[in-house]
Amino acid sequence: MTVRKRSKTWWYDFRLMGLRYRKAIRGATTKWQAEQVEAKAKKDAFEGVYGLRQLGGQRFEQFVDDTYLPWARANKGTWRNDDLICNVLKQNFRGKTLREISPLAIEKYKRERAQSITKRGTQRSPASVNMELAALSRIFSLAIEFEQAATNPCRKVKQFALDNREHRYLKWEEQPALISVLENPPIQATPRLYNATLKVTVAARARLRDAILIAVGVGLRRSEQLRLRPLDCDFSRNVIVVTKTKTAKSREVPMSDEVRAILRRLCASKKRDDYLFVNPKTKRPFMDHKTGFHGACADAGIEGLTWRHLRATFGTRLGNAGYNAFEIAALMGHSDIRTTQRYVRVGQRLHEAVQSTMMGSGLLLVTNENSPNAGDELKMLANG
């Protein structure tokens, strides 16, 4: 520090970029007080020299509308999600400049959003709040890149800890029931409308069956699967070339025999650049299978299964088959191996490991406590 006391008054005196900053510190009675004033003066001088003080003066909602959203539409495959999230962020931080949004304000936003109720009347999930915080952090990161902000206040706000392990997937015993209702849909209609209803329902369920088997067979994301075209199906090498992915990196996924047969049939009547999953009413690609899928699950008596669980089924079955996380990540298109860990279940080797703890020196632990020899056998095990 460069504070000095002259007579009864403390002064600071320092240089920055050839400029001298010298001033009396009125009211300071101790050296510590003078040093605190000097530290603030140095910070203000540094920000003034390097222009940091002027950064962050743009209003938050203006930067989002004029800079961030156009950038997201041009560079992100999930920009539609950003549109929805930014509406919420703009409403909460409206009127504030970028530098006026502090970590404390973001922490308050995080707490209030976690306690809010959704349109469905349910408690907002921590995962949803984390998505909003991630979008807010990306906004500030872009502002720093474009020299519109000096710091990212989101870095000082921790996201909610989540259990990201996928516990729900399509079980082997559930699959036959689901396929059965897709191939033989139950029809409830008056006799006069029966034939027309049957024709429409059978066609819709047939399309849904193809989509489900492909989802389970190759583990594509919903958006990746709905954008599939014949030119993406390389039957000579027996792979699907997945483009426009979430991570912006193309990948190749091998086809199983069943998936290959389905894709062959779907591609037969399509041009190379036609979409494979097209709504017959609108003649446009499907945006989702949500309604039909939920209806089929209800008819099959399957609860708690959503479309994203089909991708989890693909990853889970790979893990159970003994493939490691790196192989699963390559097939599923994960950029972070930690994401893949949620799909790795208890494998056969771990089952064998646990089983080995119940066996020793050829003695198997008796599970029937009513056995007359159970006590003696337990003593034998205890004594080694």
Image (spheres, helix red, strand yellow):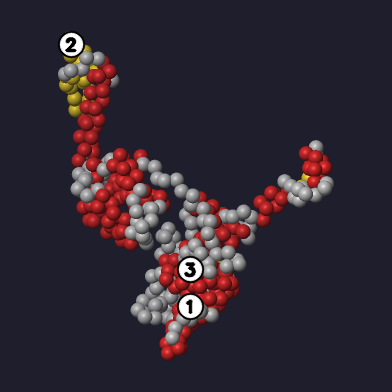
Answer with left or right where residue 59 lies relative to residue 372.
left
In the picture, the disc for residue 8 is 2
Q: Quadrant of the C terminus?
A: top right
Q: Which residue is mark 1?
A: 205
Q: Which residue is mark 3?
A: 241
Quick check: 341 above or below 5? below
In the rendering, at what x and y percent does residue 50 appear?
Answer: 23, 37
Among numbered discs 2 and 1, the one appearing first in the sequence: 2
| Element type where label 2 sits in the image | loop
Among numbered discs 3 and 1, the one appearing first in the sequence: 1
Residue type, mark 3 in image: Val
Quick check: 184 above or below 243? below
CA gap, disc 2 and disc 1? 90 Å
Among numbered discs 3 and 2, the one appearing first in the sequence: 2
For the point 80% across and 49% down, the residue is: 371
In the rendering, at what x and y percent does residue 273 appear?
Answer: 40, 76
Quick check: 362 above or below 13? below
Q: Are marks 3 and 1 in contact (CB under 8 Å)?
A: no
For the point 59% across and 61% down, the residue is: 318
